[in-house]
Structures are given as C-alpha cells and as structure tokens.
Amino acid sequence: LETLDSGCLNSATVCGVDWTTLPDDTVIQLFSYLNYRDRASLASTCRTFRLLGSLLCLWGSLDLRSYKFDTVAAVSLSLRCKNLQRLKFPAAGSADAIVSLQARELREISGDFCRDITDAALSVFVISSLSTPLSNTGSAVMNWILRVSCLLFPIYF
C-alpha cells in the first residue's frame, strides 16, 4: 500500500477529496463530535489523525454509558484521560475500571444504576482521583474522604 506524504493511506482520498488536507482545527472539531470508539478508529487511519485525535483538549469529557466499560478499556484510554474532568459511566461493574483511568483532573462523575456501589470502591476511586497520592491510608482517612467527597466534586447516582 502506498502512503501520501502525511502518512495516510491513499484510501484517504475518497471521491477526489483528500481528507488529510483539511485544516487541523476542522479535524479537531470533527473529532469532538465523535464518541471515543469512533475517535480511536479514525485516529488509527493515519499519523496525522492519530496525532490530532490524541490531543488532550478532546478528552475533557467522556460518556461511557452506551458501552461496556472494563479495566482493559480503561487502561487503553488512560493516556488520553489525564485532563478528563467529566465522566459518565454505565453501572457499578465499571467502578473498578474507572480507577484505571488515572484521571487526576476529574471534577464530576455520573453513574447509572450504581445503587450497589460499595463504600470501599468509592473510597478507592476518590483517593485515586486526588492530585496528591495518599500512601498508607488507614480506614479512618478513607472514611473521612468518603464523607467529604461531596466537597471535592459532584457525585451523581
């Protein structure tokens, strides 16, 4: 397969239009309308789209409610989620995976059908989201964090 100078396959030229020649701002705007899976799929087509698709400005908010979200998916997204501020996730089963995102800038989470989420899972999540990691935390510290977590960021269930 031949590639164009931008590193994209010739198939990037569809109906006489070379999509790789679009201005970066336009491509970033198009990426912002895509869900995370479509964004990743498009980013895998060429170096230019991979670079633009990984910009942190596109990863400030993530809605995972329509997807099965597990630890494997979280680990693959973790490099892009450093500036993640808003997260919507599907169920209590996703709570453990959220910790793997390592989203230190997270300010708001919203979980659907999470009535069964445990205090321990929520405590681990809050501790892992803090900018300063807490080592050797005891149960008293974790209980305190759980009680004041509503002051750190809104939590909706």
Image (cartoon, rainbow, N blue to C red):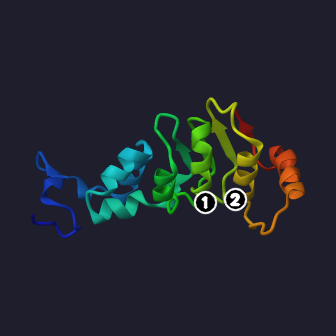
Q: Residues within 10 Å of mark 1 (few under 14, many from 20)?
A: many
Report if residue 30 is visible in the image.
Answer: no
**Amino acid at dot 2:** Ser
The reply to whether dot 2 and dot 1 touch (C-beta < 8 Å) is yes
Q: Amino acid at mark 1?
A: Gln
User: In this orientation, which residue lies closer to the viewer: 142 or 53?
Assistant: 142
Q: Quadrant of the C terminus?
A: top right
SS under mark 1: loop
Residue 145, visible in the rendered structure: yes
Crowdedness of circle 2 by 10 Å Cα count: few (<14), some, many (20+)?
Answer: some
* Depth check, front residue: 22 or 135: 135
**To which residue does mark 2 refer?**
128
Left or right: residue 99 versus residue 49 is right
Q: Name the residue at 31% across, 64% down.
A: 48
Choose between 128 and 2: the one closer to the eye.
128
State the SS at label 2.
Answer: helix
As drawn, 105 above or below 135: above
Residue 142 on image: x %, y %:
83, 54
Relative image position of residue 39 (x, y in whole percent): 38, 49
Q: Is 73 placed left or right of 112 in the picture?
A: left
Is residue 22 or residue 147 the one in the foreground?
A: 147
- Examine the image and state in which quarter residue 52 appears: bottom left
Query: Which residue is depicted at the point 57% across and 43% down?
Result: 94
Residue 7 is drawn in which quadrant? bottom left
Q: Which residue is mark 1?
A: 102
For the residues marked 2 and 1, what is the alpha-carbon distance in whole angstroms? 7 Å
Disc 2 or 1, which lies upstream in sequence? 1
Q: Which mark is residue 86?
A: none
* Image coordinates for residue 63, horizontal then vertical, percent: 53, 40
The N terminus lies in quadrant: bottom left
What residue sits 43% from the left and 42% below the top? 35
Residue located at (31% from left, 51% from top): 42
